[in-house]
Image: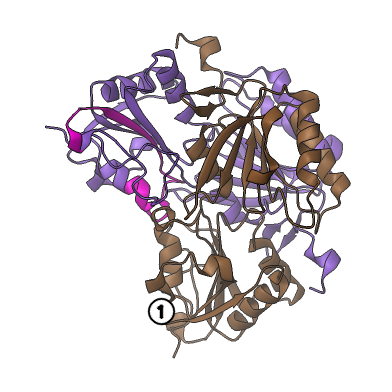
Chain colours: A brown, B purple
Amino acid sequence: MRSGCNEIGKCNGNTDTQDKECAGDSGSGKGCIRVVGLGPGDECLLAPQARQAIAGSDVLVGYTGYVELVPQELLAGREVLSTGMMAEVERCRKAVEAARAGRNVVMVCSGDPGIYAMAGLVMELLEAGGLFDQVDFEVIPGIPAFSAAAALLGAPLMHDFASVSLSDLLTPWEKIVKRLEAAVSADFVVAIYNPRSKKRSGHLSDALEIMGRYRGPETPVGIVNRAYRDGQKVQVVTLGAVDESDVDMQTVLIIGNSSTRTAGGKMLTPRGYANKYDI
Amino acid sequence: MRSGCNEIGKCNGNTDTQDKECAGDSGSGKGCIRVVGLGPGDECLLAPQARQAIAGSDVLVGYTGYVELVPQELLAGREVLSTGMMAEVERCRKAVEAARAGRNVVMVCSGDPGIYAMAGLVMELLEAGGLFDQVDFEVIPGIPAFSAAAALLGAPLMHDFASVSLSDLLTPWEKIVKRLEAAVSADFVVAIYNPRSKKRSGHLSDALEIMGRYRGPETPVGIVNRAYRDGQKVQVVTLGAVDESDVDMQTVLIIGNSSTRTAGGKMLTPRGYANKYDI
């Protein structure tokens, strides 16, 4: 027997805007769905709130590659529904259906569940089904992939930055190009997600060409593969010397702004203290 | 006696690009400095790696407001050097000096230490002093303030977004304006940090006016104060109805893109699944 879905927002003592009354103990059988960020993948960066949410769930739903990031002991004792890549709608629908049936569901995502992940799609399905009154919904934030990459690279994101996905599965390529141009022309640091797939081999070189219109070839570029996972690889190269064979779908690239430099073999975007203080 | 600074990168089994050899056990007395992200503030969102780094340190350095976020039991047994706001250079210099003396130092920051925080300034000081060989340096990522705000708001960041600080203490206001214009004109979701201080009362209204040139007055805007801390306040309003008295220096604002809408009282930026799939 499931125990219902209590303690939404438990971790935070001050959830005045969140639903504190979940069915559970009251026996009304109202289900809930928590979209949970696993962070980059290593258990050492999994937040206690995420761990608690998984441990308290009846059903865990996720892409198979992310379910593998969940600590083994947390998978025991609950139903696990995993689906392959590209099956996002199916996956979220399963999660919503289970919650609608009164179960306590977690949908796991790598990184932050609110950045290019499943928090939005779950909300879309709840909205389409008119289910916000029937199912409690919560997002548990995680350390995003660009924060993990940045930490391994040094301090590349220190100033204003833009995050752009090169995937054109759901976004017209023209819009992506416009965003890249806007970001680089206004001197944002740029974090690039989904830089490459088998079907989109040319997008990364196009993106780098756009960057090169506004930044010099010596601009530092960080390339991070599998941050905090088996096979991690961290490189600081230059915009003129990115080797695209180092890049796959899971790589995060961080392209410096006009002030970014290397220091101690790492990437540093100064915030501007040196202009004002004696460093 | 201090125990030296071992186990840099310990949490991650695959730190091929990181320094695994820290003095500690070898007795060379090499110090280290870890810039640690506390996340939004609630202990439930403090990563185990951050907790371990603090627990293993000799000296903890931080802005007094952030030191207060460190769990009490972790403050015991170590020297705590806290400084007031605006004393960033002094604070980082103390941390670097302690590490240079062979101590195991953590510099704590709220959110992610690599986003508008201290990772970069510590690197600048290490660079200026030529200290990268003498002091081990590591950044431990945390959940950024915009991820925390987004989780409480629903799913506003789901698509490409830009992060802009309105503080002109270190950045010319003209550059900030240019970034705001670029971001909104290319339909990024925009996260705004440091929206207001006593000295800069007009910047937020200027920023909102710029947003209003490209987005309608009904565009959803999330206003989050003190996410996951005492006194948390989460509001979803519209661009035409932002009450600036709700905003202070610690507030994060998230301004939707052209597709952002409200759903279930929360903020939703669809990724685009509904254009391709039956939702």
Residue situated in front as seen by the camera: B249 or A109: A109
Q: Can residue B67 be seen in the rendering of this structure?
A: yes
Query: Which of the 4 image quadrants contains residue B194?
Result: top right
Query: Which of the 4 image quadrants contains residue B122?
Result: top left
Residue at 81% x, 26% y is A213
Residue at 54% x, 43% y is A149
State the residue position of label 1.
A76
Residue at 66% x, 17% y is B172
Residue A218 vertical position relative to residue B144 in the rendered view, above or below: above
Where residue A83 sits in the image (x, y, percent)? Answer: 63, 75
Quadrant of the drawing holding the C terminus of chain B: bottom right
Residue situated in front as seen by the camera: B250 or A95: A95
Q: Can residue A137 be seen in the rendering of this structure?
A: no
Image: magenta residue range: B25-51
Where residue A115 sits in the image (x, y, percent)? Answer: 64, 53
**Does residue A234 appear left or right of residue B160 in this picture?**
left
Chain ID, mark 1: A
Q: Amino acid at mark 1?
A: Ala
* Residue that lies at the very extreme toward the top in this rendered image: A278
**Does residue B190 appear left or right of residue A199 in this picture?**
left
**Does residue B253 appear left or right of residue B104 in this picture?**
right
Few, some or many residues within 10 Å of mark 1 (<14, 14–19, 20+): few
For the image shown, how many numbered marks are present on the structure?
1
Where residue B76 sits in the image (x, y, percent)? Answer: 19, 41
Element type at mark 1: loop
Residue A145 vertical position relative to residue B30 in the rendered view, above or below: below
